[in-house]
Image (cartoon, rainbow, N blue to C red):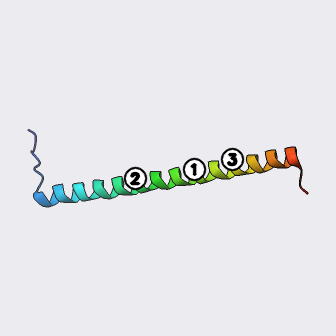
């Protein structure tokens, strides 16, 4: 015979709160990685532009 388990309103609220916290943390973590990715790409692009400028005109 199986025992039926019923979730109380407090149990459901606790589960939802935990899921919300995890989703929020994951969302902001993904945004942070995206921003750092853009910064990294911009830095690489700036170095390439600087190198191309230096190779064509020279530094005088």
Label 3 Cα neighbours within 10 Å, binned few <14 / some 14-19 / many ≥20: few
Q: Residue at x 87, y 48 (%)?
A: 57
Asked whether 44 or 4 is in front, the reply is 44
Contact between marks 1 and 2 (CB within 8 A): the answer is no
- Mark nearer the N terminus (2 vs 3): 2
As helix, strand or loop, the secondary structure at mark 1 comes to helix
Residue 23 is left or right of residue 15, and the answer is right
As helix, strand or loop, the secondary structure at mark 2 comes to helix
Label 2 Cα neighbours within 10 Å, binned few <14 / some 14-19 / many ≥20: few
- Mark nearer the N terminus (1 vs 2): 2
- Which mark lies nearer to you, 3 or 1? 3
User: Which label belongs to residue 46?
Assistant: none
Disc 2/disc 3 C-alpha distance (Å): 27 Å
Query: Residue 15 at what x, y percent from top left?
Result: 23, 55
Label 1 Cα neighbours within 10 Å, binned few <14 / some 14-19 / many ≥20: few
Asked whether 46 or 38 is in front, the reply is 46
User: Which label belongs to residue 38?
Assistant: 1
Q: Name the residue under label 3.
A: 45
> Looking at the rendering, in which quadrant would you find the N terminus?
top left
Q: In which quarter of the image is residue 8?
A: bottom left
Residue 23 is left or right of residue 60, and the answer is left
- Mark nearer the N terminus (3 vs 1): 1
Q: Mark 2 points at which residue?
A: 27
As helix, strand or loop, the secondary structure at mark 3 comes to helix
């Amino acid at each position: 015979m199986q025992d039926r388990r019923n979730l109380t309103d407090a149990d459901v609220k606790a589960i939802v709160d935990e899921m919300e916290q995890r989703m929020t943390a994951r969302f902001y973590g993904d945004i942070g990685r995206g921003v750092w990715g853009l910064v990294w790409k911009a830095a690489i692009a700036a170095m390439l532009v600087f190198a191309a400028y230096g190779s064509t005109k020279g530094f005088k």
